[in-house]
Image (cartoon, rainbow, N blue to C red):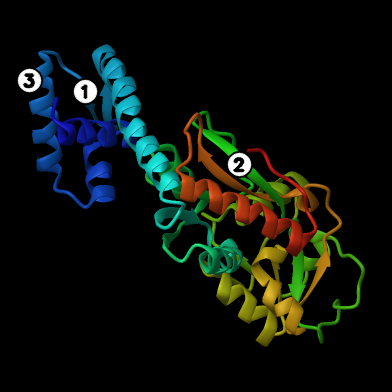
């Protein structure tokens, strides 16, 4: 069985569409279709049915997908064992992360590469849903997502407490408060993330349930813009400590706890594909990340 045909079928199956798989692989849809037709011809049975929403696996396709997972993940396990035999002199980690955690990610990568300079990283900034999709289809080794919804194919390898707080300049009139309510925050000029951000969806859900009016002075898809708005424009934004660690240490911003039970329990999950044996470099980096969390935030959490 041709490995390229099997790999192409696997990508189309997990992405649930030829076009989506072609975009992720940067390969022409016609090339993927050719690989799948050749695999179906070799096996003598139809593997995929096309629909308006993408592709649907036939019963034979389900069997083939299970086999493809074993073969392709087995290859990764073999490479991981070879990395271990090399004493982690090299390796590669592909990581997806929502923007708010990038400072944390780059800190941990820098510390890890001081010890293992031969390990390379590819870091992709993406939204929560894209991050989870990348992990579930095997494109990402790790994915950092803000308070993600449960996913059958994904496990949480490390959970980091990241309560959302009101963030403002030290000169703001609320900066000396010990806590403020969400209603109080929304009564001031606020910068909120766009609706596709997990933070915004959570805020909108809470406000809808409590009949609070959400009328931000600025909406953006940039965490950096939210930080700058609070620092330079005299407004308030809402972020976790992971997004403003440097600014808090420098005294450029202050964060005030929000007196809401849900906002105080938000977290960042480091996600991995369930049942997958992690490559040596990925496993070592995950352990380094766990130690960094204990040192930086005083947390002792972890799942794997």
Residue 271 versus residue 22: which sits nearer the camera? 271
User: Nearest the camera: 270 or 18?
Assistant: 270
Question: Can you give x and y, in whole percent of width and height, for residue 259 in the image?
Answer: 86, 57
Q: Mark 2 or mark 1: which comes first in sequence?
A: 1
Q: Quadrant of residue 228?
A: bottom right
In terms of depth relative to the viewer, which is nearer, 98 or 38? 38
The Cα–Cα distance between marks 3 and 1, rounded to whole angstroms, is 12 Å
In the image, taking residue 26 as reference, residue 42 lies left or right, namely left
> Can residue 4 be seen at all in this image of the molecule?
yes
Residue identified by numbered label 3: 41
Image location (x, y in percent) of residue 238: 70, 65
Other-residue count near label 2 (Cα within 10 Å), few / some / many at <14 / 14–19 / ≥20: many
SS for dot 3: helix
Report the disc number at residue 48. Answer: 1
Determine the secondary structure under disc 1. Answer: strand
SS state under label 2: strand
**What is the count of numbered marks?**
3
* Circle 1 crowding by C-alpha within 10 Å: few under 14, some 14–19, many from 20: many
- x, y percent for residue 185: 78, 67
| Contact? badges 2 and 3 (CB < 8 Å) | no
The mark closer to the camera, 2 or 3, is 2
Q: Which mark is residue 157?
A: 2
Between disc 3 and disc 1, whose residue precedes?
Answer: 3
Q: Note whether 176 is above or below 50 in the view shown.
A: below
**Coordinates of residue 76 in the picture (x, y in percent):** 36, 38
């Amino acid at each position: 069985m041709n490995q390229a045909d099997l790999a192409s079928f696997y990508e189309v199956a997990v992405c649930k569409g030829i076009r989506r798989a072609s975009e992720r692989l940067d390969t022409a849809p016609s090339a993927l279709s050719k690989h799948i037709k050749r695999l179906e011809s070799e096996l003598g049975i139809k593997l995929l049915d096309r629909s308006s929403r993408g592709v649907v696996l036939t019963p034979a396709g389900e069997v083939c997908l299970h086999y493809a997972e074993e073969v392709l993940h087995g290859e990764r396990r073999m490479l991981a064992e070879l990395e271990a035999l090399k004493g982690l002199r090299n390796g590669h980690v592909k990581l997806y992360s929502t923007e708010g955690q990038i400072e944390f990610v780059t800190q941990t990568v820098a510390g890890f590469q001081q010890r293992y300079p031969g390990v390379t990283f590819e870091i992709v900034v993406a939204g929560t849903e894209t991050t989870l999709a990348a992990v579930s289809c095997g494109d990402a080794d790790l994915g950092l997502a803000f308070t993600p919804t449960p996913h059958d194919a994904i496990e949480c390898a490390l959970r980091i407490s990241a309560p959302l707080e009101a963030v403002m300049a030290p000169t703001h009139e609320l900066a000396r408060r010990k806590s403020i309510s969400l209603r109080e925050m929304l009564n001031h000029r606020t910068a909120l993330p766009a609706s596709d951000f997990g933070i915004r969806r959570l805020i909108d859900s809470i406000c809808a349930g409590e009949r609070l009016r959400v009328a931000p002075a600025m909406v953006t898809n940039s965490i950096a813009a939210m930080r700058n708005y609070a620092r330079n424009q005299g407004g308030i934004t809402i972020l976790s400590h992971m997004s403003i660690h440097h600014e808090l240490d420098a005294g450029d911003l202050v964060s005030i706890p929000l007196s809401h039970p849900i906002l105080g329990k938000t977290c960042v999950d480091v996600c991995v594909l369930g049942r997958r044996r992690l490559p040596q470099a990925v496993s070592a980096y995950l352990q380094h990340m766990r130690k960094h969390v204990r040192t930086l935030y005083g947390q002792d959490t972890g799942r794997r």
